[in-house]
């Protein structure tokens, strides 16, 4: 049943915002320079990269995903501590797409009363046309939903062209088909059954909430005893108690899950506030104050009965802890992101032989060195070994470019390069059996430095 009001406007605003972002974000471009994709948000499975505007995530940085999951979970706990299941009522994908499907249904078949009459009507050409149009529009929305999802995993304009010309990978068509079917079934047919029976969050949420959380609440201290408007006026004329509730049933007729909020807080309630809008509209028509149903607590009802002012404690220990956890995890992720390296070096010492004593008495160790360039352009790195005596030579096999006796190694964009490095101590210098040394890699333009430690072995 359609309803107008403040919370309905909030839901429409969030619906258009979230769906707009979901459907159109893959088409936003962001210039990252040469050899890099220009799609703002992209999960590049082939290139093993994740892109979000200026942020680039590599496979070994799975801890960022862990951090995001922690923030998402704690944010869900925070929303629950503030106002119960507001995630379910306003932002959950099931709620958002179901709202969209119900809007289509109302536009095609009419409001609740019209749909009831249509269900009872015999099958005519008009009825068949309406039903067919509704299901066609549902399938188009579901298809667009599946299509938008796969666009996050490839260049969106290119993939759209490939899909239209039947040149896209089979996996793309498969995932579009799966998501089309699930969206159509979940949002078009199962609707509130997903929230009531399939979703585990209501059970978890019930264990996490407390008496300070705001929930959609029927203020029974004001509404009871309920009765029709005529009955309540008659009771008032007789000097008998009469509640403001006129028993119009609007509150549970607009409820997506069919909850009669007058029976108290229930597990099925998704805290969407539509019953508040419906009740406020009725109260306005009958000349009663709004707010018979509102976001409130049972404690405040008791306080009103005692003649005290209501107290709302949104900022309390629980919410402060949740907000602090979000802030700390976010700060750690930001620090790691801002201080991470765009180059890398790994060193493996030769196992056999561990060292070689040469004819002049000098000692040579061999290493396999892998250099990593995480940038999308070619870079040059200078290799230096620290912790060795003066006159120690560092030779990179096959590398002719040198600077001050140090090899200059070219590494291509977004790739690694493996080289063999020979470190030779000068003759006549007594070396301990094991000397800790540092391989220092310095980028020639920006001066970025990365290091790793190993050992120089001697007799």
Image: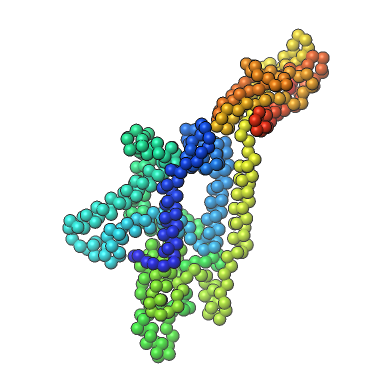
68 in relation to 345, above or below: below
Q: Position of residue 271 (x, y in %)?
A: 46, 63
Q: Nearer the viewer, residue 318 or 175?
A: 175
Q: Nearer the viewer, residue 41 or 72?
A: 41
Location of the N terminus (image quadrant): bottom left
Q: Is residue 278 visible?
A: yes
Q: Is residue 190 visible?
A: no
Location of the C terminus (image quadrant): top right
Q: Position of residue 297 (x, y in %)?
A: 52, 70
Q: Nearer the viewer, residue 79 or 372?
A: 372
Residue at point 60% right, 49% down?
A: 330
Q: Position of residue 33 (x, y in %)?
A: 53, 35
Tally the numbered discs. Answer: 0
Residue at point 55% right, 55% down?
A: 75
Residue at point 39% right, 72% down?
A: 281
Residue 357 lies in what quarter of the image?
top right
Looking at this rendering, what residue extends furthest in the top direction? 359
Looking at this rendering, what residue extends furthest in the bottom direction? 238
Residue at point 32% right, 35% down?
A: 165
Q: Nearer the viewer, residue 1 or 27?
A: 27
356 in relation to 213, above or below: above
Q: Position of residue 224 (x, y in %)?
A: 43, 79
């Amino acid at each position: 049943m359609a309803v107008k009001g403040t919370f309905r406007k909030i839901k429409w605003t969030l619906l258009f915002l979230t769906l707009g972002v979901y459907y159109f974000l893959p088409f936003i471009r962001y210039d990252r320079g040469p050899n890099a994709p220009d799609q703002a948000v992209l999960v590049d499975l082939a290139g093993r990269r994740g892109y979000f505007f200026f942020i680039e995530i590599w496979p070994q940085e799975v801890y960022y995903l862990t951090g995001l999951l922690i923030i998402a979970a704690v944010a869900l706990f925070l929303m629950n501590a503030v106002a119960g299941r507001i995630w379910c009522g306003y932002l959950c994908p099931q709620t958002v797409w179901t709202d969209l499907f119900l809007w289509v249904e109302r536009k095609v078949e009419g409001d609740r009363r019209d749909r009831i009459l249509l269900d009872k009507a015999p099958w005519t050409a008009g009825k068949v046309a309406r039903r067919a149009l509704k299901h066609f529009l549902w399938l188009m929305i579901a298809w667009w939903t599946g299509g938008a999802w796969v666009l996050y995993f490839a260049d969106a304009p290119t993939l759209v062209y490939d899909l239209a010309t039947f040149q896209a990978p089979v996996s793309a068509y498969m995932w579009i088909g799966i998501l089309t079917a699930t969206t159509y079934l979940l949002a078009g047919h199962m609707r509130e059954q997903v929230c009531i029976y399939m979703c585990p969050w209501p059970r978890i949420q019930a264990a996490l909430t407390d008496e300070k959380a705001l929930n959609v609440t029927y203020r029974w201290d004001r509404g009871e005893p309920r009765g029709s408007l005529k009955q309540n006026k008659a009771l008032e004329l007789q000097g008998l108690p009469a509640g403001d509730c006129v028993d119009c049933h609007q509150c549970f007729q607009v409820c997506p899950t069919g909850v009669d909020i007058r029976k108290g807080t229930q597990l099925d309630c998704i805290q969407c506030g539509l019953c508040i809008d419906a009740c406020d509209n009725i109260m306005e028509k009958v000349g009663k104050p709004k707010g018979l149903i509102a976001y409130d607590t049972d404690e405040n009802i008791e306080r009103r009965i005692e003649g005290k002012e209501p107290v709302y404690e949104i900022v309390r220990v629980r919410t402060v802890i949740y907000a602090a956890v979000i802030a700390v995890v976010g700060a750690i992720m930001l620090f790691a992101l801002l201080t991470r390296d765009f180059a890398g070096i790994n060193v493996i010492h030769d196992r056999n032989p561990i060292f070689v004593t040469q004819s002049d008495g000098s000692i040579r160790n061999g290493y396999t060195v892998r250099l990593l360039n995480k940038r999308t352009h070619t870079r040059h790195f200078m290799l230096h070994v620290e912790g060795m005596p003066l006159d120690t030579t560092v030779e990179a096999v096959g590398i002719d470019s040198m600077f001050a006796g140090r090899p200059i190694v070219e590494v291509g964009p977004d790739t690694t390069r493996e080289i063999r490095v020979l470190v030779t101590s000068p003759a006549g210098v007594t070396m301990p059996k094991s000397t800790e040394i540092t391989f220092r890699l310095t980028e020639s333009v920006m001066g970025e430095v990365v290091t790793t430690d190993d050992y120089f072995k001697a007799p």
